[in-house]
Amino acid sequence: MVPYLLKRLAQSVFVLFGITLITFLLVFLLPADPARMIAGRSATVATVESIRRELGLDRPLPVQYVSYLKGLVRGDLGRSYAQRAPVSDLIASRFAPTVQLALAGILFELLIGLPAGIAAALRRGTRFDQVVMGLAFVGVSAPQFVVGLLLIYLLAYLVPVFPLGGYGTPMHLVLPAVAVGLAGGGWYARVTRSATIDVLRQDFVRTARAKGVFPSRVVLKHVLKNAVLPVVALVGLDIGVFMGGIVVVESVFGWPGIGQMIWQAIQLVDIPVIMGGVLITALFVVVGNLVADLVYPALDPRIRYQ
Amino acid sequence: MGSTQRARGHERRAQVAVPRSDGAAAAPVAALAVDGAGGAGPAPGARRGARRAPSGWVRRFLANGAGVVGLVGVTLVVAVALAAPVLAPHDPARQYFDGLTLEGDPLPPSERFLIGTDLLGRDLLSRVIHGARVSLLVGVVANGAAVLIGLVVGVLAGYFRGTVETVLMRLTDIMTAFPALILAIALAAILRPSLWIVALVIALVNWVWIARAIYAQVLSVARRDFVEAASALGMSAWRTLLRHILPHLVSTLMVFGTLGISTTVLLEASLSFLGVGVQPPMPSWGGIINESQSYFLDAPWLVVFPGAAILLTSLSFNLLGEALRDALDLAERR
């Protein structure tokens, strides 16, 4: 267990390091010149030069990268060009809304995906099963921004139950969470269904049924533990896809999260903020994967740590 | 997002479950083929052999109602895209005088403009029809490129092993941790989007899952007796690859070739919606919705129809791909 943990941790650090390198190379391919953007249109060449020097952009790329890494180790992500504030502060202020939306979205995914999947598996091959799986396919295929906009139109405009957008109360959270979680809900319905069917076919389920164990108890005891819990652990592996959805949905609902921050930073060529934002989302993914890999074998003793 | 990306959940499940014989490179021995089977028994694709009669899977596919629905949907979208100039009732770029109300608002669906007009008084139906060309072209090109990159990376890593394997699979690990859409946004913003750039960007973020699946499958095939026999008999590595390994990948490629389009169409729509995809005046479904965003509460048709087109396309390729996967026996047993 401990060697496995150490190995996975080392892998995660390596992946994060690789991400800093790739992101760094990417943002410096930007055709726009951040010094010029900061200085404004009317600035003289001298002003642009002095800004460039002040930001350290006149140094060779490897030097800039190493100094960025040095800062990173100390938790210093640099300062935003556009807002003159430390990137870590910007991320900190955006962190809570994104985590809130992510957790609510995941909750919604599981809340519709798991019951739908179990129910479809229990009525396998029936019309009900077909309808549920058909809906799951539609959910997976529906673009999140369209879902978001339609939800706004139907439930915030025509029937004004929820606010049109913005952030603050639990009511603000509902529509974005549904928009971000619908695709995952469809996906988990499908995964849960096949996992449940696998478990229902196992000998211990047959034995339990033969013994006369109440059907609902079979589901609660065997299916939940052996099929559904492992599916829940998949959430950690899906964070990458999920974060992409969050960027789109934050844009639709004007949600003041990390996705919006990255999006605005790209428009302003605010390199430190882009770097910081991509790193923090990658960190979400790496941590999610790590947790899933650790939790998984704990849920299923047949799986060994390697 | 799309199923190809989400598919990794299953993939990873198998990966943890399958014991590794080679600890060295921490190679995840996961294949679509061993998925759900818990790693026990030979891969179904291999069991049946590459030369299985095509009628078998075609018959299985046709027996699957959802797959046929998907095939019909795909055919429909392709037909609309091909026949766009004939089908479109109006010029998609023309701003009609009578296409706006006197106050300058877009028109709701009417006899003249069947699904209404957009903010500039252009016929929405014609734009949606022509948008099919853009979406399909980007979707197909991006997915084709992603499959190609995934195939090359997966085969090189899985067959030649050693340093090549380490470098490629570590690169894959890193790419896996990039949230695909965020990377695509950053790339598209850097590269100044055109239709081909958008396709390239999508391919660059989307090959990772395909590479992993191909890699795992190559690993499992390369270990089998007939491959060892071929090299023992003195067959060259390249010839073994072509004759004995690539045929085993055909089913996987077919599945990713269709299923993946569902993902790429959705990614293109999302990028265009965010304004870093296909640029106006070229009509793309995501772009139409982006242009209309500020106005959609008063003109919901501007979101509903392009949105329905995206859903129909993505859903059709999804159904088709999943049915192919079932028919080709790659899926977990149900």
Image (spheres, coloured by chain):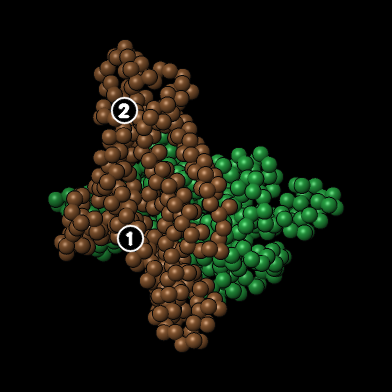
Chain colours: A brown, B green
Element marked by disc 1: helix
Badge 2 amino acid: Arg
Element marked by disc 2: loop
State which chain disc 1 sits on.
Answer: A
Badge 1 amino acid: Leu
Residue B326 seen anywhere in this rendered image of the structure: yes
Residue drawn at (59%, 67%) of the image? B37
Residue at the front extreme, as displayed: A2
Residue B27: give x, y in percent of width and height.
61, 49
**Residue A131 sits in which quadrant?**
bottom left
Q: Is B168 located above or below residue B314 in the figure?
A: above
Residue B126 seen anywhere in this rendered image of the structure: no
**The C terminus of chain B, quarter of image:** bottom right
Foreground: B84 or B176? B176
Q: Is residue B64 left or right of residue B312?
A: right
Q: Which mark is residue A107?
A: 1
Residue A128: give x, y in percent of width and height.
40, 79
Residue drawn at (55%, 78%) of the image? A203
State which chain disc 2 sits on.
Answer: A
Q: Is residue A186 left or right of residue A41?
A: right
Q: Which mark is residue A79?
A: 2
Residue at the left extreme, as displayed: B103
Residue drawn at (71%, 54%) of the image? B222
Residue A14: give x, y in percent of width and height.
51, 38
